[in-house]
Amino acid sequence: MDLYEHQARQLFAEHGIVVPRAEVTDSPKRAREIARRLGGRVVVKAQVKTGGRGKAGGVKLAADPAAAELTARQILGMDIKGHTVGTVMLAQPVDVAEEFYVSYVLDRAAGRFLAIASAQGGTEIEEVAATRPEAVARVPVDPAEGVTSATAARIAEAAGLPPQTVDVLVRLWEVLTREDALLVEVNPLVRTGDGRIMALDGKVTLDDNARFRHALWGGEDSADADPLEAAAATKGLHYVKLDGEVGVIGNGAGLVMSTLDAVAGCGARPANFLDIGGGASAQVMADGLSVVLSDPAVRSVLVNVFGGITACDAVADGIVRALDAVRPTKPLVVRLDGNNAARGRAVLEARAHPLVEQATTMDGAAGRAARLATTT
Ligand SMILES: Nc1ncnc2c1ncn2[C@@H]1O[C@H](COP(=O)(O)OP(=O)(O)OP(=O)(O)O)[C@@H](O)[C@H]1O
Ligand SMILES: [Mg+2]
């Protein structure tokens, strides 16, 4: 899960990294009050989960509270790289003498972390990295060792950062490890005119697998999540929205992936990925069907189940119960194979639902579902 800048800076502050005073709002009127509280002049910053906000006009200096209100009005509702600005953060302006870039990122291929740092931070960092890669230091970090003061000193030296940044580098590592983040980035980390080191912008990606350890993370950010994915998540389903018209439900991620390929191979496009898992119950099948059928783009549904631990007759019972609960309006093609497949097929035959047909092979089922989706 990516955090907003204002959430990232809060984590930084909790770990002792100095950040400018700031407040968040979705109202231009409140922006004026906040600016007054912060001393009049403020930086107004779009809160969207993408970089390059400054270049897109989403970071602006306002000279006084009236200007802050006007600027907030301009920035709220703005589209930045496909993200609509719903809130702005107003921050006290800082007298910037130098801008640095620092980040820690998980390097999966190497099985460790990577510290990336540069004395040429700021909004042009991508340009710097592309044209003068020697200005960006990359220092591997052994996860078992972590970033000690000695490691931090090595990172600072490699990047040409002043010695005062060593303490921030250690604290930023603590943010990464204690908060279970996969990425922490500060750009810019600045040296102010009076010699203080402050984080003016922050990006943090938390590891979703650690969610259970952080009750306060709360739900997924509904403004950014696809509504169907959000609905599926509340039901504990592994669902990913795709662009096509054939709804896909299967058990086991591998089987579902192959099913997506089979649908594509038949000239249609899958509308989603949905893995109902190994021990899929009738309830899970009903939940899955209701999510897939509520996608207006879906024109047919392909249920592809290979009975292993779960017997096909249990899955068929689930489908029958789901049909009664969900009342589909779109055709379903069901392919059952594996453990108790014959019994499962018999259950569906007995129910004889007019919108449900069965297929015996995966390719046959995919072909039929694709035809139904492209011709009906
Ligand atoms: N509180 C502040 N005081 C002074 N200058 C600031 C402040 N906040 C941001 N800036 C300036 O605005 C620039 C852009 O802001 P920021 O880095 O937050 O947005 P961004 O464009 O999204 O960043 P990035 O390019 O890292 O994605 C900073 O590099 C800095 O020079
Ligand atoms: Mg930045």
Image (spheres, rainbow, N blue to C red):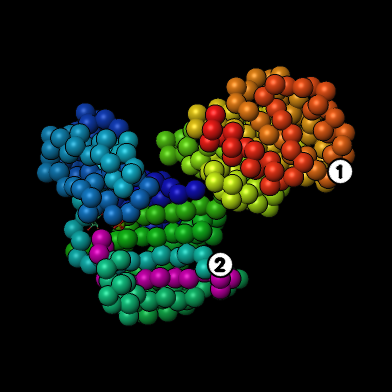
Tag 1: amino acid: Asn
Q: Which residues are magenta?
A: 109-124
Mark 1: secondary structure? loop
- Ligand 2 is found in the corner quadrant, namely bottom left
Q: Which callout, 2 or 1, points to the residue nearer the camera?
A: 1
Question: Who is closer to the viewer here, 294 or 34?
Answer: 294
Q: Is residue 113 magenta?
A: yes
Give the answer, above or below, for where 14 lies relative to 229.
below
Q: Can residue 283 be seen here? A: no
Tag 2: amino acid: Arg
In the picture of the structure, the residue carrying the numbered disc 2 is 108
Q: Residue at x 52, y 68 (%)?
A: 107
In the picture of the structure, the residue carrying the numbered disc 1 is 339
How far across and how far down the image is residue 46, in percent?
Answer: 28, 43
How far across and how far down the image is residue 287, in percent?
Answer: 66, 29
Q: Can residue 352 be seen here? A: yes
Q: Residue at x 44, y 73 (%)?
A: 152
